[in-house]
Amino acid sequence: QSAQGRRFLMKLSLTLWLLSFMLKRALRRKPRFREQLERMRGLDWGIATEDLSTARHYRMTPKRITSGKGLPVDLDLELRFRDQEAALRILRKPTQQAFLDGMVAGDVRLVGDSADMNKLQKLLRYL
């Protein structure tokens, strides 16, 4: 693997870890985030590259959020990115348009129900 490839891998791993930190903090500090999560009754989801070289999952309930490496098979939703570079580009500005553009370009693939993706996007607004 090239030096640039290793840099993307490290940046993506750090980004996904920071996301778990931000989700947990939002649960503690942001009532609107908590309310939205209660309405959803929780969501288990994950982010990974297609080759699974980088993968992290998030289990969210109104009471707590846990996160870990890898993609368990029982997730409600998975966001699979073509590679680390595509993942970083889209996750830097995770708007609905960025995801739609990424899907059209083949940079991101949704595994699961698109309704869960809409729930997730509503929730992430409160980060």
Image: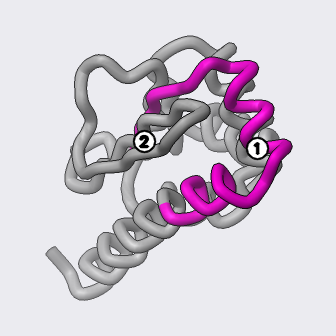
The one nearer the camera, 51 or 48, is 48
- Residue 96 location (% of width, % of height): 78, 40
- Residue 15 location (% of width, % of height): 48, 68
The crowd level at tag 1 (other Cα within 10 Å; few <14, some 14-19, many 20+) is many
Rendered residue at 63%/43% (across/down): 102
Rendered residue at 30%/18% (across/down): 74
Rendered residue at 47%/44% (across/down): 65
Kindly check if marks 2 and 1 are in contact, taking CB atoms under 8 A apart as contact: no
Labelled disc at residue 44: none
Locate the C terminus and report the quarter of the image it occupies.
bottom right
Whether residue 97 sits left or right of residue 51 in the image: it is: right
What secondary structure prevails in the magenta region? helix
Q: Is residue 99 above or below residue 53?
A: above
- Residue 27 location (% of width, % of height): 65, 50
Asked if residue 78 lies in the magenta stretch, the reply is no
State which quadrant residue 29 falls in. bottom right
Q: Which residues are magenta?
A: 21-47
- SS at badge 1: helix
Asked if residue 44 lies in the magenta stretch, the reply is yes
Whether residue 115 sits left or right of residue 21 in the image: it is: right
Name the residue beneath numbered marker 2: 58
Q: Is residue 99 above or below residue 75?
A: below
Name the residue beneath numbered marker 1: 33
Q: Amino acid at mark 1?
A: Phe
| Earlier residue among tags 2 and 1 | 1
